[in-house]
Image (cartoon, grey):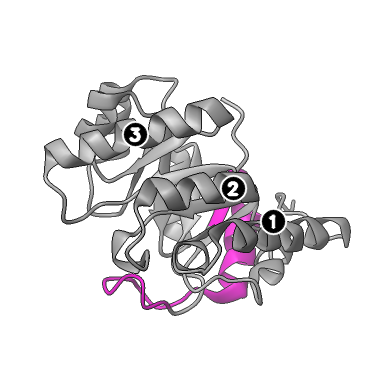
Amino acid sequence: MNIDYSLYLVTDRRLSLGRPTAEIVAAAIRGGVSCVQLREKEMSTREFVAEAKALKELLSAAGIPLIINDRVDVALAMGAEGVHLGQSDMHIRDARRLLGKSAIIGISAECLDDALEAAEEGADYIGISPVYATATKSDTAMPLGLDGIAIIRRRVSLPLVGIGGINQENCAEVIGAGADGIAVVSAIVSAPSPEKSAAELLARISDARTSGCPGKALK
């Protein structure tokens, strides 16, 4: 499956300023997001599935894949395009067996060894996490920085998505370091206008690429 990871939105109800997740995602779609991950840590399974189904309807109409954070069971129940797994979640081999060959499986990598293992085990993309310090998650490793992206880029040919502390001010340098895309939470979810924020992020990503900083493997 050919997926555009350029602007990858990760949802978070706690940061939404009281707005429904579907409202934010709809606005972000208008602004140009290319991939959406539904992350829900406090919902019941039934609520999570219902929320995912509502988003799937929105995203399918726009041709944008829905990725479920952590929960392979939820992805299976509502027919999401894939899952994103952390280092302590279900192993990629087991997730692949359950979801099938066509599913998108992303893996969070906190170091080069994580990324190399994910590539060897058959991940579809790697989330480099965190690039910068972030308040969005409290259980993250030390930031890898731009040098960390560059090191992984030299060794891994899979699509790389940087996440953690990324916003309009630094997204271009993340692309310049070798990432194929950026994943953001608060930069869109907490923005007064998620649509305008997404459009601005996408414009800066495009500018970074045309200025000679594409996120592709360095041999």
| Residue plotted at (32% across, 64% down) | 18
Q: Which mark, residue 82?
A: none
Q: Is residue 104 above or below residue 98?
A: below
* In-image side of 131 versus 79 (left or right): right
In the rendered image, which residue does mark 2 sit on?
A: 33
Q: What is the crowding at mark 1: few (fewer than 14 residues within 10 Å), some, or many (at least 20)? A: many
* In-image side of 173 versus 138 (left or right): right
SS category of the residue bearing label 2: loop
Q: Looking at the image, which is closer to me, 214 or 8?
A: 8
| Residue plotted at (28% across, 23% down) | 97
Q: What is the crowding at mark 3: few (fewer than 14 residues within 10 Å), some, or many (at least 20)? A: few
Q: Of marks 1 and 2, which one's residue comes earlier in the chain?
A: 2
Could you tell me the amino acid type at mark 3? Ala
Labelled pair 1, 2 in contact (Cβ < 8 Å): yes
In the rendered image, which residue does mark 1 sit on?
A: 202
| Residue plotted at (54% across, 60% down) | 194
Magenta stretch in the rendered image: 134-161
In the rendered image, which residue does mark 3 sit on?
A: 54
SS category of the residue bearing label 3: helix
